[in-house]
Image: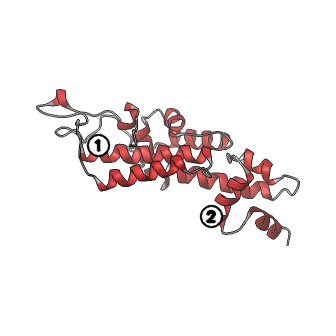
């Protein structure tokens, strides 16, 4: 059995119009077979037992799965017409998910803390939104999920640091949020298609 406890701010601010407003919120249900929830659960379980996973990146993965699960629950398992949300997350002028000021603040925070154990709670707090609304707004504004954006930002910083031959791979790993050189190498090869060492050597050719 996989038991997941999710914070209430994952679900934003539910509201329900018309009769039954007092009952707005998630339904209490059991014995429901939902293929999407099942696949999310299996993905979370696999992540939790995967010994080789980078702990810092795993946290972001788990946060992302939590948002996906919250979205599914809100889509299928709410009372009445409670699929509308009270908290705004679109900028009316630009039509994008986050206004320029919030987006700049979040991106600046990410860049300044790439070596840290970033999580969605931190980013949502910087944007002054719930986790659920922040993830949706960030994806609309940038075209990437927070996890994808942070992963790409870390790889970009790795590339810049590899240009300095005096910096070791271990130093680069810990400066870009990876728990070890091995985890950095695995993520770098997946993204770039080559190892950090080979990439560094190609810069000097």
Q: On the image, numbered disc 2 is attached to which residue?
A: 190
Quarter holding the N terminus is top left
x 74%, y 45%: residue: 174
The answer to which of 79 and 85 lies nearer the viewer is 79
* Residue that mark 1 sits on: 74
Give the quarter of the image for residue 55: top right
Give the percent coordinates (x, y) of residue 30: 24, 41
Report how many numbered discs are placed on residues in the image.
2
Residue sitting at x 37%, y 46% = 69
User: Looking at the image, can residue 141 be seen?
Assistant: no
Percent from the top left, x then y, of residue 118? 59, 40
Q: Is residue 78 visible?
A: yes
Classify 196 as above or below 134. below
**First in sequence: mark 1 or mark 2?**
1
* Farthest left residue in view: 19
Q: Which mark is residue 196?
A: none
| Secondary structure under the numbered disc 1 in the rendered image | helix
Residue 83, given in percent of the width and then of the height, sits at: 25, 42
Q: Nearer the viewer, residue 108 or 100?
A: 108
Q: Position of residue 192 (x, y in %)?
A: 66, 66
């Amino acid at each position: 059995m996989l038991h997941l406890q999710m914070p209430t701010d994952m679900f934003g601010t539910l509201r329900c119009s018309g009769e039954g407003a007092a009952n707005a919120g998630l339904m209490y249900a059991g014995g429901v077979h939902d293929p999407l929830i099942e696949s999310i659960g299996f993905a979370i379980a696999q992540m939790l037992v995967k010994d080789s996973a980078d702990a810092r990146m795993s946290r972001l993965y788990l946060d992302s799965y939590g948002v996906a699960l919250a979205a599914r629950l809100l889509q299928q398992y709410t009372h009445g017409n409670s699929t509308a949300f009270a908290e705004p997350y679109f900028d009316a002028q630009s039509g994008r998910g986050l206004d320029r000021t919030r987006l700049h603040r979040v991106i600046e925070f990410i860049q300044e803390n790439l070596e840290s154990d970033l999580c969605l709670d931190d980013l949502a707090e910087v944007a002054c939104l719930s986790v659920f609304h922040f993830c949706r707004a960030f994806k609309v504004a940038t075209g990437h999920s927070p996890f994808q954006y942070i992963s790409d930002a870390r790889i970009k910083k790795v590339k810049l640091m590899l240009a300095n031959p005096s910096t070791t791979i271990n130093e680069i790993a810990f400066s870009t949020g990876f728990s070890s050189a091995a985890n950095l190498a695995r993520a770098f090869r997946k993204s770039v298609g080559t190892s950090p060492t080979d990439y560094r050597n190609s810069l000097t050719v």
